[in-house]
Amino acid sequence: MVETGHFALVLAFALSLVQTIVPLFGARLNNQRLMAVGGPVTITGFALTALSFVALASAYANSDFSVASVWENSHSLQPMIYKITGTWGNHEGSMLLWVLILTFFGALVAAFGSNLPATLRANVLAVQGAIGAAFFLFILATSNPFIRLNPAPIEGRDLNPVLQDLGLAIHPPLLYLGYVGFSICFSFSVAALIEGRIDASWARWVRPWTLVAWMFLTGGIAMGSYWAYYELGWGGFWFWDPVENASFMPWLAGTALLHSAIVMEKRSALKIWTLLLAILTFSLSLLGTFLVRSGVLTSVHAFATDPTRGVFILCILTLFIGGSLALFAMRASRLTAGGLFHPISREGALVLNNLFLTTATATVLVGTLYPLALEALTGDKISVGAPFFDLTFGPLMLPLLALVPFGPLLAWKRGDVFAASQRLMAAFAVALAAMLVTGLFIDGASVFAALGIGLAVWLVVGALTDLAVKSGVGSVAPAVMFRRFAGLPRSVFGTALAHLGLGLTLLGIVATLSFGTEKILSMRAGETVELSGHTLRFVGLYPAQGPNYSEDRGRFELIGVSGSPVGEISSAKRFYPVRQTTTTESGIKTLGLSQLYISLGDEAKDGSVVVRLWWKPLVTLIWGGGLVMMAGAAMSLMDRRLRVGAPSRRRKQASAAAPAVLP
Amino acid sequence: MTRKQKRLSVIVGGLAFLGAATGLTFYALGQKASYFYMPADLTTASVQPGQRIRLGGLVEKGTIQRGQGATVAFSVTDTHKSVKVTYTGILPDLFREEQGVITEGTFGPDGVFVADSVLAKHDERYMPKEVADGLKAKGVWQESKSE
């Protein structure tokens, strides 16, 4: 089975070369038969990669320690779920998952792209094949997951205990679906540059793909943030760690792309800019892969440091980013620029959004790469953390967030800021009230907290106002209003939900940072502690045995008003003997939207235990907002004009008008 | 305003915006980035009390003292020099004697480094990269330590 997987991987590499070369020449020579090779080859390549992945996963599931990667990252006593998720809990396996998703998206284009012009489809598949070929070669040459060990060890070295968590089952696949999803936008852009023209179908395809990739990336980042929050025991949700920035940059650029693609689709303006953004977004995904996988950064994600890998990925990076940008420089002038528009309009607002988002991406990029560049040039080692981003990223986000509710209320072509402001009066009043209540009635609220809460409420109510205005609240009879509401395009709901989710995330962040409380103290069994009105009693430390670890579980009781326990929280110190590693399992109790968070420290000689407690008000909104944003993207995808297979008048006309070019 | 003036004002506005963002970024890099030092570097570098730095090295054997409550004192060494560090909080799971750590904080007036964060390795197989490089440069790195 393992050799089958290895062989399938080599075959998939060979096919990806065919997928790159044959359709590309076919499109150049306008040869239908050569171009038609692309589809089946892409789908077969995906099937082979899937086979290869299944082979590796089954080696992990069966604890086949004759495979080096399984030996290094698995153990026979691990629960089955961690054996399987361990497949991508290491460098080699995670790269295989990366190409699996890449070929999957390629196969989707091959399977559902029959309505694309033949040359565009052939070029897209060729570019997708080229990316695949580079990464297949990378895997086979430097990170082969199928290398055997002889003699086979009896027992494995266990998966990194931090990764032995359900988060590993969700975070990497979602994140990769996002990262790699942007490869389709990239391939479409490069294909358009190769052809030297931007097709109408190009515009129609880029937006749904951006939405899909953005949705998964949002989920991946939110899930990664929650995972780090509960697993690492530090109680923080975002650390401005370079690895986090690596996923955040494509998200910011992808968000900009999402918005500029709307302008392109509706008004066929900003075409060249959108194309450039699509290239940049995937370039940032590649950069993220490089930063995380090359070992230039030390983090939980850098599984192993092997210089050849870093150099190899750097070459891939240079080839694709440099190549696509060079192609852009050569061809961009040939493309027809879109129409002009008035600065005060929906388009104008979206351009402003892009200006802010791309500048914000650039500041994150500088903050992430500057320490690396400085070390390479001067040898000075510096770290750029939260204080830097608070000063640069923060000021860019504040005006952008304040402007968000205006955007959807401005009309296309020529908007009226005054009319939009009038409609937002209610939202503004609510936000102002929230700000005043926070500032005046909550103890210890800073100006920042009051402004932040006000801004978050402004976003939430602003998003709802958009829906209310568009369904005619206050101007038509209730029956008409409900009919209008139900008949609103799904993309309007999508926009409102995404902006609402953004507001909820901001609310969670501001509330947690401003009103969260923290206590570090040493406790003995039977002692109680109070934190922001919650009384906790430390019951004691209880040893327990897990499948591949032993633990000391500290149990705490939440004492209710009556003095009797109303709930239990437990946090544990786990010891994994195979890796000689200790981890902390945090104890979390969700109360409404807020959480009590307990992290257990070391036991002192006198039997007391250091305990760190946090009260995190509204903290779940941080990730809940992310889920709402994902729901918004899903809603937009279900919009009539994007639905796959939905009959569209335009397509019918096109096929009726030009039957001759169809094969 | 004529069409030309309008376009010009949009371009000037955009450039001013980008200029402000660039200026802010470089100001922030100068002010907010914290430099990494090993204990022996501190004799040559001038680090003011209150200046935020990152101090890395190995936790010196036999120096970990648990004080009142959650306060811990230990020494960080690069085998040439060592610096006394105090920290209040929960130490990372992989914090041990003779293991690489990075602490971030400021020097107090008494010359004791007051750390507000202590990072150890994420994984028992690797040393923080800065510490490993620093030890290599000082000729005290042994490959066996990485295992």
Image (cartoon, coloured by chain):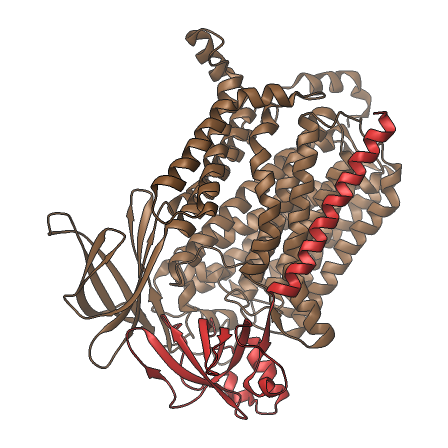
Q: Percent position (x, y) of residue A120? A: 77, 36
Q: Is residue B127 left or right of residue A198?
A: left
Colour red maps to chain: B
Q: Percent position (x, y) of residue B120? A: 46, 74
Q: Is residue A324 left or right of residue A240?
A: right
Report the front residue among A651 and B33.
B33
Q: Quadrant of the C terminus of chain A?
A: top right
Q: Percent position (x, y) of residue A104? A: 60, 46
Report the front residue among A283 and A90.
A283
Q: Is residue A239 above or below residue A547?
A: above
Residue at the (54%, 28%) spot, across then down: A638
Residue at the (44%, 79%) spot, across then down: A153
Residue at the (73%, 16%) spot, across then down: A653
Colour brown maps to chain: A
Q: Is residue A240 left or right of residue A43?
A: left
Report the front residue among A5 and A114.
A114
Residue at the (52%, 35%) spot, across then down: A498
Q: Quadrant of residue A391?
A: bottom right
Q: Is residue A618 left or right of residue A41?
A: left
Q: Percent position (x, y) of residue A191? A: 78, 41
Q: Quadrant of residue A350?
A: top right
Tally the marks. Answer: 0
Report the front residue among A561 and A471.
A561
Q: Is residue A264 visible?
A: yes
Q: Is residue A544 above or below residue A5?
A: below
